[in-house]
Amino acid sequence: MKRSCALVLALWVFATPAGQPLHAGQSVSTRPTTPREPVSAVLDAFRSHPLVALGEGRHGNEQSHEFRLALIRDPRFPSLVNDIVVEFGSASHQAVMDRFVRGGQVPDQELRLAWRDTTQPHTIWDRPIYEEFFRAVRALNSSLPRDRQLRVLLGDPPIDWNRVGSEADYGTLVSDNRNRHPFALIQREVLAKKRRALIIYGDMHFVRQHALYNYDASFSLDSNSIVTLLERGTSRTKVFTIWTNTTADLEKVQTDVPSWPRPSLAVLRDTVLGAEDFRFYNPTEMARYSFRNGKPDFSNPIPRDQWRSMSMQDQFDAILYLGPISSITISPLSPALCSDAAYIAMRA
């Protein structure tokens, strides 16, 4: 069984996708980026924005999880926020999650389908921090009056795995829906009801332009991120976006960053860290493509010397600092999963 578990779990490797170019004559600020106490900074953002998009950083990291718990447990949070939209849950199980976070009785096996039955076939959501987050919301709600209890909206689109027999089937069913589905969900359940939501997703779901399309703002909204759909789509809703840094050595740009409190949040506009090229934060090297007749032309990659640049401050509004990237730790999978034959069969 150990060998089978190792083989299965090793197959699933998480990878995040990549994504206003710097304008000619745009000034580059030399003002140092200033850290703030992060919980208060996020809550302040809700006073002027109905939506705050909090990137997770590397999926499964324990430091961003601890920050999320501190944020929702702050006594000010329920008075400012109504909903939490998460990537790590399937919309197919929304009714179950609604019942659970309100204090209803839900068997563990039924509850766990919420994060095991997503469009992502890897093991990342099986790490215990995600179940712990749902249970933390449930515990918080038990201490709140009914009209102030938090709702968790499961943002991953529903998928019928019985219809998936090949990679082509998977692509047809999922396509760009992983951004369009939460966009529609937020419009319907949050904005239309005059509510406010914290959105927790991988950071690349929040970029304002994609490197894949060489930061071309003219491409179809269907291929855009959640944030771009919200800001450029029908709702025209300004989102406060936060990059959770688990990839870039920030001290290479601003030398005093290692002395910042952990965690800290810093607004990026007109600062040294904000002026840095986005490739510093997301160094993934991938081909880039232009558009022809409203569709990406994947047959002709754009030459590297024609790649556009984009400053970090044009992608994100703020950065969450959790500590040096060497200090980031990943939540381990429970050893009990390796002895669960049904689980191994499902992942296989």
Image: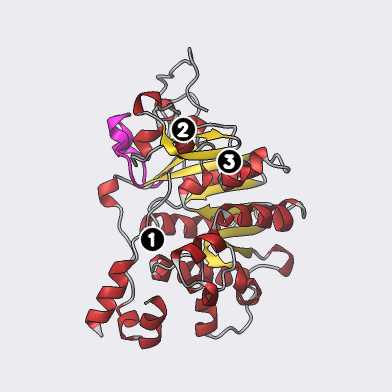
Q: Tag 1: Cα neighbours inside 10 Å, few (<14), some, or many (≥20)?
A: many
Image quarter hosting the N terminus: bottom left
Residue at image location 65% in from the left, 44% down from the top: 230
Mark 2: secondary structure: loop
Instruction: Identify the mark nearer the N-term, 2 or 1.
Output: 1
The amino acid beneath tag 2 is Asn
- Verify whether residue 91 appears in magenta: no
> Overall secondary structure of the magenta stretch?
loop
Mark 3: secondary structure: strand
Q: Is residue 347 above or below residue 269?
A: below
Q: Name the residue under label 3.
A: 240
Callout 2–callout 1 Cβ contact below 8 Å: no
Q: Name the residue under label 1.
A: 60
Instruction: Identify the mark nearer the N-term, 3 or 1.
Output: 1
Q: Name the residue under label 2.
A: 214
Residue pushed farthest right? Answer: 193
Give the magenta part as a residue range. Answer: 246-264
Spatial separation of the CA atoms under disc 3 and disc 1 = 23 Å
Relative image position of residue 340 (x, y in whole percent): 36, 86
Task: Please identify the quarter of the rendering in which residue 158 is found.
Answer: bottom right
Residue at image location 45% in from the left, 32% down from the top: 312
Residue at image location 58% in from the left, 36% down from the top: 219
Residue pushed farthest left? Answer: 3
- Verify whether residue 250 appears in magenta: yes
